[in-house]
């Protein structure tokens, strides 16, 4: 993550230290963190209990991401460390979600592969998205943006979310149980945080409950899907395909069977990878950290204790 000059200027009130967590030696990391009052990190930096222990003066963590599973929130809450996120990527991720749905349904990966092999074929038939039943697992900011786009594509949309107080949305039906939604869905799209309750939410049982031609889309966090179970479901034709921007292990092993399946599209975690969105995320993260360091209220702080 590169800080441009305007961002650097926002930290003129404090001493700024830049640390490459991936390459820093344990001694260098400990030296950099021992007096740190605030941290600005990306989702690739794991702030586990051992790492946070190196920062006894820490007051705030600002992550340039909407996800926060890379941060030990139990430790942060116990030490009254404020953790902030950047919920400004909803449009970019929603766009990519719809793109993956269309890519898998229309078999675009196979068409591109054909061209690469010198094959020009108009006989490879995909499927319309119009009229398809989309199940959104999670109906937060991104889920709602996906719903709006899906409705514009003339899809039918239903949602499963454990929160009781969801704001309704015209054209979107709420299902009572995940099993109900999985049984009727042509497309299942994941939009929940990764936490103990959602880890491997989609497993062998879930895939067995789906239609044999249904597809799974994940632009949230890889661990929400049991990847081994997904691979089995695809190889054994229990489901029809998958579009994945996230995996349990990133990057995947070169021989991961998912990468070779023609009905699977795998992207390298690029949901927020637009110039506009990445700029907005960094701007938001810097603003979050500055507010915390000044003792001001930050509206993007997580409700942890």
Image: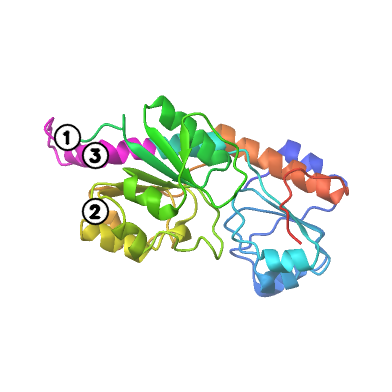
**Place of residue 42 in the rendered image (x, y in percent of width and height, measured from the top left):** 62, 53
Q: Is residue 144 shown left or right of residue 251? A: right
Q: Nearer the viewer, residue 295 or 31?
A: 295
Indicate whether residue 207 is drawn in magenta: no
Q: Which mark is residue 107?
A: 3
Q: CA distance from mark 3 to mark 2?
A: 12 Å
The reply to whether callout 1 and callout 3 are in contact (CB within 8 Å) is yes
Q: Nearer the viewer, mark 1 or mark 2?
A: 1
Magenta: predominant secondary structure element? helix
**Residue at 21%, 56% in the rendered image:** 237
Q: Is residue 109 shown left or right of residue 294? A: left
On the image, which quarter does residue 33 sit in? bottom right
Residue 196 in sight in this render: yes
Element type where label 1 sits in the image:
loop
First of labels 3, 2 by sequence position: 3
What is the quadrant of the C terminus in the image? bottom right
Q: CA distance from mark 1 to mark 2?
A: 17 Å
Q: Nearer the viewer, residue 21 or 94?
A: 94
**Place of residue 293 in the rendered image (x, y in percent of width and height, measured from the top left):** 84, 50
Outermost residue toward the front? 176
Q: Which residue is mark 2?
A: 261
């Amino acid at each position: 993550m590169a800080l441009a000059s305007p961002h650097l200027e926002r930290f003129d009130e404090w001493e700024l230290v830049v640390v490459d967590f991936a390459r820093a030696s344990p001694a260098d990391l400990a030296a950099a963190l021992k007096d740190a009052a605030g941290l600005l990190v990306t989702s690739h930096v794991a702030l586990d209990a051992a790492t946070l222990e190196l920062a006894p003066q820490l007051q705030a963590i600002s992550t340039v991401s909407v996800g926060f599973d890379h941060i030990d929130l139990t430790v942060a809450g116990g030490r009254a460390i404020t953790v902030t996120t950047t919920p400004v990527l909803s449009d970019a991720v929603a766009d990519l979600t719809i793109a993956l749905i269309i890519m898998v349904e229309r078999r675009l990966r196979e068409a591109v592969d054909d061209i690469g092999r010198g094959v020009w074929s108009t006989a490879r038939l995909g499927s319309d998205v119009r009229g398809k039943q989309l199940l959104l697992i999670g109906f937060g900011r991104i889920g709602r943006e996906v719903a709006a786009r899906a409705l514009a594509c003339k899809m039918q949309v239903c949602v499963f979310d454990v929160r009781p107080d969801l704001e309704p949305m015209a054209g979107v039906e709420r299902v009572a149980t995940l099993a109900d939604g999985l049984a009727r869905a042509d497309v299942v799209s994941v939009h929940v945080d990764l936490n103990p309750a959602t880890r491997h939410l989609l497993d062998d049982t879930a895939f067995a409950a789906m239609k044999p031609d249904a597809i799974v889309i994940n632009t949230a966090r890889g661990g929400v899907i049991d990847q081994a179970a997904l691979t089995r479901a695809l190889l054994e034709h229990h489901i029809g395909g998958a579009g994945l921007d996230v995996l349990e292990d990133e990057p995947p092993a070169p021989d991961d069977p998912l990468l070779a399946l023609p009905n699977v599209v795998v992207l390298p975690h690029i949901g927020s990878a637009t110039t506009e969105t990445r700029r907005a995320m960094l701007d938001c993260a810097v603003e979050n950290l500055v507010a915390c360091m000044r003792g001001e209220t930050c509206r993007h702080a997580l409700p942890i204790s």
